[in-house]
Image: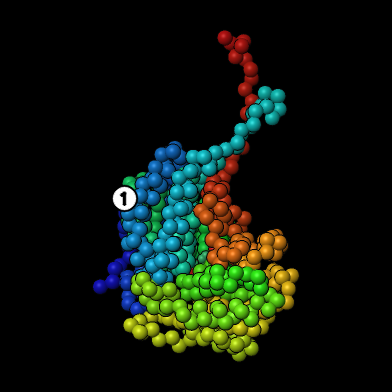
């Protein structure tokens, strides 16, 4: 009997009262792992009101006391590390090494947010005019909603949760309905912390649940991560109801390979970037722009590396690439590969119709490498979000940068070279918010913002670090005067 997932509201586990439940499946086996409730608006309303009721007391708890909960959470996450990593692999399909890496990133955000007493500090200026002082403090915004996608079920809520909590907000997390199990386990740990009821809440659901959060007057801030069309919707709808919003969207990440790039390192890193987590990372490389004949050596090297990747159930330690998230997703990816070929690309490795021994029911593709993808065509422009890498040859670095900057998205752009001058030119000129230099997944550490640009991001302040601290706080500036009558009184 699959587990029945619950919401966690006001310090207790509860069913949200709707009658729609979805199955959560293991994409490697198609086995049903759990059922997840789609929380109806009335239950969202209740959670939001209870979170709002918990806010004043939590806000008054000193920041030094609030972060004690995070120190304890870090210990619990370390103790449950393997169990949580396994949960990520089971519901998402990525291999255990990737799941562990994801969780490590989550914990780093908890560690960074433990510095809130300093990160939240304000400013003070004496004598801005004669006898007048002025200072600025940061105060929490109230209730924050965090809405996350399926591809990093353990990490992405942590881009926000520790900062929102430590700065004194109460929080509602809405995980992806496709991968909700890991957050269920994380909330089991949060429950052990003994936080005041209503400070952290878990609300499961899909689009209607999200819309109820976006519209709710008790919610002051919304942090969203997901696909670009939904990010646009979330940004517009939550802004329309007066909330501050950041919405991270999809991506189509280009890598530029120069002929002087280290052959072995570049091949290994590009292969991992394109095919790791079955290409379902928002920082996955999906277009490799080869410059000045670089494709002559890199195309065969990448084809060999792609063909060698061990595909299977991510729980097997030998497996390098797991399945994609659903059967529908596999169909969509296979159809986009077909479209790319019809538009003139050439398959160096075709990963469609994969049969994985022992995982016949799973949603598998093998890595796919397409050469000579036409400019402006599907493979060069569409977010495929699967293990597909297109190769596109150009003559010069300028031309490559022009191609990078002509793209719709700006989540990440990378260059592979042994020339410092070429690397500098690239990082200076490329229109993307996360840049990799001889790096294939340029994921910022927790103390840097996750800086998507263009259609990969809607908002101003990004996830993680100081940006998150600013996002979850509002500034208050005080100008004050005290008549100097002390000497007359005493
Ligand atoms: P998604 O947009 O389908 O879902 C994200 C969240 O939005 C989920 O919680 C879902 O329940 C909710 N949602 C879905 N449709 C909705 C609708 N119509 N109205 C309101 N809410 C809705 O994304 P996904 O498939 O779970 O995740 C993959 C996408 O996320 C990819 O496009 C990937 O690039 C992107 N992503 C971006 C980043 C980033 O940092 N920019 C990070 C990870 C993933």
Which quarter of the rendered picture does the N terminus lie within?
bottom left
Residue 37, quarter of picture: bottom left
State the image quarter where residue 339 is shown.
bottom right
Q: Nearer the viewer, residue 361 or 304?
A: 304
Q: Is mark 1 within 8 Å of ligand 1?
A: no
Q: How many marks?
A: 1
Task: Please state if 478 lies on the left or on the right of 182 as rendered.
Answer: right
Structural crowding at the residue carrying mark 1, measured as other residues with C-alpha within 10 Å and reported as few (<14), some (14–19) or many (≥20): few
The residue furthest left is: 1
Identified at 52% across, 58% down, the residue is 223
In the rendered structure, the answer to whether residue 378 lies left or right of residue 93 reads right
Residue 328, position as x, y percentages in the image: 46, 81
Mark 1 sits on what residue?
192
Quadrant occupied by the C terminus: top right
Q: Quadrant of residue 94?
A: bottom left
Side of 133 where 165 appears, left or right: left
At which x and y percent is residue 127?
Answer: 68, 27
Name, please, the residue furthest toward the bottom: 342
With respect to residue 119, does 264 lie above or below?
below
Of residues 222 and 110, the one drawn nearer to the viewer in this rendering: 110
Q: Toward the viewer: 295 or 21?
A: 295
Q: Is residue 16 above or below residue 339?
A: above
Q: Tell me where residue 2 appears, x and y as whole percent.
A: 28, 71
Q: Kindly tell me whether residue 271 is visible in this rendering.
A: yes
Which residue is painted at 43% across and 57% down in the image? 104
Q: Residue at x 38, y 67 (%)?
A: 96
Residue 203 placement, left or right of 413: left
């Amino acid at each position: 009997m699959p587990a029945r997932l619950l919401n966690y509201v006001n310090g207790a586990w509860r069913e949200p009262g709707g009658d729609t439940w979805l199955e959560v499946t293991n994409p490697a086996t198609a086995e049903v792992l759990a059922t997840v409730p789609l929380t109806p608006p009335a239950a969202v309303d209740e959670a939001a009101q209870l979170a709002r009721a918990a806010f004043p007391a939590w806000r008054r708890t000193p920041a030094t006391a609030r972060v004690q909960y995070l120190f304890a959470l870090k210990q619990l996450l370390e103790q449950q590390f393997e169990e949580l990593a396994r949960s990520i692999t089971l519901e998402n399909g990525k291999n255990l090494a990737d799941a562990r890496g994801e969780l490590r990133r989550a914990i780093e955000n908890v560690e960074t947010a433990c510095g809130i007493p300093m990160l939240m500090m304000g400013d003070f200026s004496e004598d801005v005019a004669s006898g007048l002082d002025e200072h600025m403090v940061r105060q929490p915004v109230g209730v924050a909603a965090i809405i996350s996608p399926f591809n990093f079920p353990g990490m992405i809520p942590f881009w926000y949760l520790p900062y929102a909590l430590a700065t004194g907000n109460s929080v509602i997390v809405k995980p992806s309905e496709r991968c909700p199990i890991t957050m269920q386990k994380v909330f089991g740990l949060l429950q052990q912390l003994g936080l005041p009821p209503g400070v952290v809440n878990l609300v499961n659901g899909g689009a209607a649940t999200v819309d109820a959060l976006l519209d709710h007057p008790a919610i002051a801030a919304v942090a969203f991560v997901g696909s670009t069309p939904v990010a646009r919707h979330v940004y517009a709808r939550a802004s329309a109801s007066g909330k501050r919003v950041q919405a991270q969207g999809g991506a189509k990440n280009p890598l530029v390979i120069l002929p002087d790039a280290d052959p072995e390192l570049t091949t290994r890193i590009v292969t991992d970037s394109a095919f790791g987590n079955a290409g379902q990372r928002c920082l996955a490389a999906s277009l490799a722009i080869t410059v000045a004949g670089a494709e002559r050596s890199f195309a065969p090297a990448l084809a060999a590396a792609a063909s060698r990747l061990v595909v299977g159930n991510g729980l097997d330690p030998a497996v390098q690439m797991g399945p994609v998230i659903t059967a529908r997703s596999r169909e969509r990816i296979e159809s986009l590969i077909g479209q790319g070929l019809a538009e003139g690309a050439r398959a160096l490795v075709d990963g469609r119709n994969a049969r994985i021994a022992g995982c016949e029911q799973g949603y598998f593709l093998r890595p796919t490498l397409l050469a000579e993808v036409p400019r402006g065509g599907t493979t060069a422009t569409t977010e495929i979000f699967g293990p597909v890498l297109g190769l596109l040859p150009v003559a010069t670095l300028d031309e490559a940068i022009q191609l990078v900057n002509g793209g719709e998205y700006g989540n990440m752009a990378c260059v592979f070279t042994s020339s410092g001058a070429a690397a500098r030119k690239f990082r200076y000129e490329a229109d993307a918010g996360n840049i990799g230099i001889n790096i294939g997944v340029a994921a910022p550490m927790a103390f840097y913002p996750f800086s998507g640009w263009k259609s990969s991001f809607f908002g101003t302040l990004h996830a993680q670090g100081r940006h998150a601290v600013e996002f979850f706080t509002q500034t208050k500036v005080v100008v004050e005067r005290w008549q100097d009558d002390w000497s007359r009184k005493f």
